[in-house]
Amino acid sequence: MIKKKGVLREWVESIVIAAALAIFLRTFFFQIYKIPTTSMVPTLKPGDKIFVSKLVYGPKIPFTAVRIKGIASPKRGEVVVFIPPHDRKKAYIKRLIGVGGDRIFIRDGNIELNGEIVVDLKIAKNKYSNDGKYGKDNQEIVVPQGQYFFLGDNSKASLDSRFWGFVDEKDIVGKAIFIWWGPKRMGMIE
């Protein structure tokens, strides 16, 4: 004899399974963010909705400091989501400028990295201002091992590593991959 499930029970089971799947995917694979500020203009504009891959750098296991090995490590020029050291309640999105051991100098709006002016267009297309504790005129910044230095593409409107310093490797959330909304802005993030 086959027992029939009630309609209500079927709906509840479907909702529970869908919620568990959504939580699993959001925790280990991807997350969606909405850009709130102008700090990354022209790359990202307020209102853009973006897809962030946690899988690329490796997702963290919830409630621990353990990170599952990712496909790659964060690289200079990539747009990355992270938790900044000065505000543990929010995720920020900025462009990665320096990794552990790098020497960074902001001069005449350009970035000098380890004694050479950066020519990678993702970084060089922007003009960076000398502001904050870690971005003063004639100041070389040395990035500690296991940490990262981030700047916003719209330097004048960005609260970034120039002001609050370095981001620890454990605080990296994921790589910004794709703008999926607004309709005229859809595309890969460079």
Image (cartoon, grey):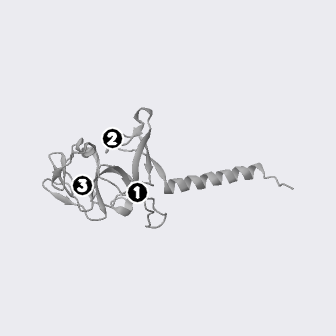
| Quadrant where the C terminus is found in the figure | top left
Mark 3 or 2, which is nearer the eye? 2
Mark 1 or 2, which is nearer the eye? 1
| Quadrant where the N terminus is found in the figure | bottom right
Look at the numbered disc 2 and give the secondary structure of its residue.
Answer: loop
Distance from label 1 to label 3 (Cα)?
24 Å
Front one among 37 and 178:
178
In this view, the residue farthest toward the right is 1
Q: Which residue is mark 2?
A: 43
Where residue 75 appears, x then y in whole percent?
A: 32, 53
Look at the numbered disc 1 and give the secondary structure of its residue.
Answer: loop
Q: Which residue does the image show at 18% across and 46% down from the upper left?
A: 110
* Res. 57 mark: 1
Mark 1 or 3, which is nearer the eye? 1
* Dot 3 alpha-carbon crowd within 10 angstroms: few under 14, some 14 to 19, many 20 or more: many
Residue 3 lies in what quarter of the image?
bottom right
Distance from label 3 to label 2 (Cα)?
19 Å
Name the amino acid type tagged 1: Tyr
Where residue 148 appears, x then y in whole percent?
A: 30, 58
Asked if labels 2 and 1 touch by Cβ distance under 8 angstroms, the answer is no
**If you read the primary sequence from the N terminus, does the residue marked by circle 1 or circle 3 appear first?**
1
Q: Which residue is mark 3?
A: 162
Name the amino acid type tagged 3: Arg
Residue 135 lies in what quarter of the image?
bottom left
Distance from label 1 to label 2 (Cα)?
21 Å
In this view, the residue farthest toward the left is 138
Where residue 47 appears, x then y in whole percent?
A: 41, 40
Asked if labels 2 and 3 touch by Cβ distance under 8 angstroms, the answer is no
